[in-house]
Amino acid sequence: MTVKQIRAFLAVAQSLSFAVACERLHLSQSALSLTIKALEEGLGGRLFTRNTRNVALTAEGEALVPLARRLIADWDNAEDELRQRFTLQRGRVTLAAMPSFAGNLLPPILKTFRARYPKVNVTVNDVINEQVLEMVRDRQVELGVAFEPTTSSSLAFTPLYMDRFIAVVPLDSPLAQLDDIAWQTLLQQPFITLQRPSTVRVMLEEHLQARGMKLPVEFESHQLATVGRMVASGLGVSAVPALCAGQMRELGAHCLTLHDPVIERAIGVLTKPGVELSAAAQALFDVLREENLAQRISGPKHQPL
């Protein structure tokens, strides 16, 4: 059965008149008759008895009426739902983002998105950088926000901005009186950092090792918020992406520009090549690109892309 056939059947069944049904459906008498005939042949029997004066439903026709009404109602509902999804009157999008982005820059971006598309729901998975890549690759989410992956990742990367690492020190530390600090000076203090396999930890160690330096790690944590608390409590110093500067200050730590070397890496949106985004995901992707992320980072300068 086709939707066209079912609509034709209901039009005749409701009016018991081929002429009235033709007017309602904007079909010719011959086209409507052929449609009903094809439906009857497909089902294996007659749905109407008709002569020159009257049209009546057979027993099988009577049985089909409530089924046909439900089918058309379900079809119309499905059609309406899809149309609303394409026009962003409703929908859902799933996003994975590393915690440093999810907890600092993402909320105001989502506020902008919600203002434009109030009926579209967003599910955020705040997971470590490596899991963001995995979730996009496995199609558990449509979009990911993370550091730029290696060329072997097989994911499409749209850069948003270049983020650099900054120093985080206790407010009562003599280092807090400085405007900026060199790595060599920072590393003379007990160091607090994220645990492996965090990309932040690996990135820091690789850059410093290339310059003959090593992190004097004394405390480790899986969460940047915990790192910030430890620094604020005077347990040591740390280095975090600049996008976390506001969070570090809220936790009671002080942020400094960090140099010699400057360690930076692009942050952007990850998608799976060859997979078309849903209308909702594309809309969120557009908002992410439109937002001036440079204005949203409270801390040392970074370079938008």
Image (spheres, rainbow, N blue to C red):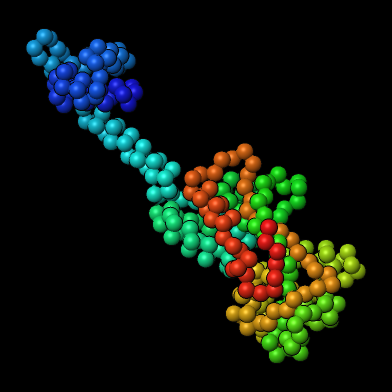
Q: Measured along the vertical axis of the image, is residue 227 above or below residue 78?
A: below
Q: Quadrant of the rendered structure where residue 274 is?
A: top right
Any part of residue 104 in sight: yes
Looking at the picture, how far across and down is residue 255, in whole percent? 69, 79
At horizontal 63% and vertical 80% (from top left) the residue drawn is 249
Looking at the picture, how far across and down is residue 198, in whole percent? 71, 63
Query: Which of the image's four quarters has the C terminus?
Result: bottom right
At horizontal 81% and vertical 73% (from top left) the residue drawn is 259
205 with respect to 4 (left or right): right
Q: Quadrant of the rendered structure where residue 276 is?
A: top right
At horizontal 33% and vertical 34% (from top left) the residue drawn is 75
Any part of residue 130 in sight: no
Q: Measured along the vertical axis of the image, is residue 305 above or below residue 253?
A: above
Q: Residue furthest right?
A: 212
Considering depth in this image, is 180 or 65 the residue closer to the camera? 180
Q: Measured along the vertical axis of the image, is residue 173 above or below residue 17?
A: below
53 with respect to 252 (left or right): left
